[in-house]
Amino acid sequence: MHDAASIPFHLLRPLWLLALIPVAVIFGMLLWRQNPRAQWGGVIAPHLLQHLIVQPGQGRGFNPLFLVTAGLVLGIVALSGPTWRRELPPFVEDKAPLMIVLALSSSMDQADVAPTRLERAKQKIRDLLGARAGARSGLIAYAGSAHLVMPLTDDRSVIEPFLAALVTGLMPGDGKNVTAAASLATQFLATEPVAGTILVVADDLDQPAIRQAAGRNGVAMLRVAPAQSGEGMVLGSDIVRVSVDSSDIQAIERRIETRFQAAQGDAFGMQWRDEGYWLLFPLALLGLLWFRRGTTVAWVVMLFVVLQALPAKAEGQPHRFADLWLTPDQQGRIAFDRGDYSTAALRFADPMWRGIAAYRALDFLTAAQEFRKVETVEGRFALGNAEAQNHAWERSMKAYDEVLKARPAHLAAKTNRAIVAALFEAQEEKRRKQEQDDSAPPEQKADEMRVDPNQKGGKRIQVTPQDVTTAGAAEAWMRAVQTTPADFLKLKFAIQATANASGAGGRR
């Protein structure tokens, strides 16, 4: 998959260029007829005609023929659909999932990168989370072992308290097992419809091991270490050295989005974007030249005649000025690109685009009505999404089933159907429970309640390390105890390391 910026320029509708042939012929004929020698050559003798021709003064104006021809050429080239970049189809997520892998080895406490390597790394991660507002990010910490700090989430406020609590002393053992960390990140990205990106933030990077463990996912690396002599900010195709400004974060973000767009293009397909509308601006400037002295009134009269000649709309509404120049779908696309989805839903004539605009405007009922008119796989998939937003779970699953019947490998439809099925089952379970509660006899309140004055401070429970050796007991204990994020993570990492060690011993 080529980067969109490197795709060569071409035309979507090159046959429109054939219209330049009659324009060139007519231009040549009219230009020849404007030559006085061509007009009078057959009537006046050539030796007399050359003395009768009066050349106009320089700088008095321009030939309208050139103006009309330039406008026609620009219009034809615009209709031919020049393009040089692609765009993703609607309903495709436009933010890359990112798993951040942070090193917590003892070397990260060195102060050769102020204030320390670890604190600078955490600062850069916070900056990256802020730049990726609304995108899903997760966090993994590693030293001698790798541990999940936070799974993928689009709420940065959930990650930041745990990120701030990370210190090297939390890890069960020292080391630089980046391969285990990259493998753990790959596991959490395996369920994504398209490949994500693994960002390794460390002072020592084992590039081949990281790339091999990343699998299908992209890799970006931020090296938090002092610069060597002659070393620039970008150390390779994947490695960026930490900088004092935000240039390192910008470089990483560009790599993440570029790889993600390429992965989306491979998974969902990308459409060429018609860029012919850019030629409307020089065309409009040429049109302004017609408003010269003596011609403005003629333009106003002609426009009035055209407006009066147009038939009335079926709804009895007056014609909009844009109707003279743009089709309904073109007007809808302009409103859609502007973010005015409600207006776009009214302007579009194509039901698929009407549904997409209504969906973006959060009018899911109208979106579902429009998608029902589209008998394609994309239309059925969009209908399933709209019905899910309407909480019409059964209709949504039916639409997804139609998509999977026509295209069994449609990963997004499989994922969405599983989510909708789980929501539908939860709703049914709640309904069954409510029916049971309604049929049960009402609870009887106690006649009297007394408090034992001799019991002070409630029941005391002493927790020993043996009580949290199993995963289930540990999770229950951590949910019940209010503690700091650092204490929580330290205990969690210790439990996971113990469980992994005992699991490895059992396998041996």
Image (cartoon, rainbow, N blue to C red):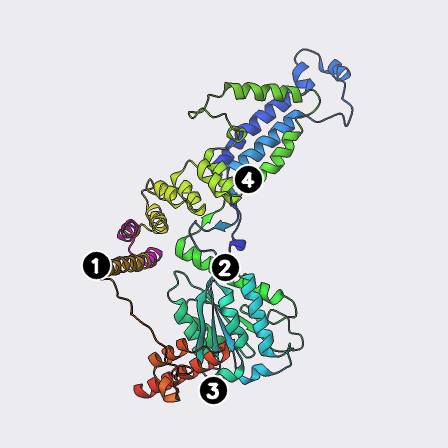
Quick one: label 3 or label 2, which is nearer the N terminus?
2
**Residue toward you, 497 or 237:** 497
Q: Nearer the observer, disc 3 or disc 2?
A: 2
Query: What is the span of residues highlighted in magenta in the rendered image?
Result: 395-416
Q: Position of residue 444 (x, y in %)?
A: 26, 66
Work out whether 221 lies above or below 104: above
Work out whether 494 lies above or below 92: below
Residue with the mark numbered 4 = 277
**Residue toward you, 447 or 253:** 447
Residue with the mark numbered 2 = 134
- The residue under the point 34% across, 56% down is 416
Query: Answer yes or no: do the residues labelled 3 and 1 have beta carbons within 8 Å?
Result: no
Using the image, tell me which numbered label, if any, was put on residue 439.
Answer: 1
Q: Position of residue 443 (x, y in %)?
A: 26, 65
Q: Position of residue 334 (x, y in %)?
A: 52, 40
Q: Is residue 228 located in the magenta-colored stretch of the structure? A: no
Work out whether 147 lies above or below 218: below
Judged from the image, the secondary structure of the residue bearing numbered disc 4 is helix
Q: How crowded is the residue under tag 1: few (<14 C-alpha within 10 Å), some, or many (20+)?
A: few
**Residue toward you, 403 or 229:** 403
- The residue under the point 49% across, 46% down is 273
Amino acid type of the residue tagged 3 in the rendering: Gly
* Main SS category, magenta section: helix
Residue with the mark numbered 3 = 173
Instruction: Report how far apart the C-alphas of labels 1 and 2 lie in the structure.
Output: 45 Å
Quick one: label 3 or label 4, which is nearer the N terminus?
3
Quick one: label 4 or label 1, which is nearer the N terminus?
4
Instruction: Report how far apart the C-alphas of labels 3 and 1 lie in the structure.
Output: 57 Å
Query: Answer yes or no: do the residues labelled 3 and 2 have beta carbons within 8 Å?
Result: no
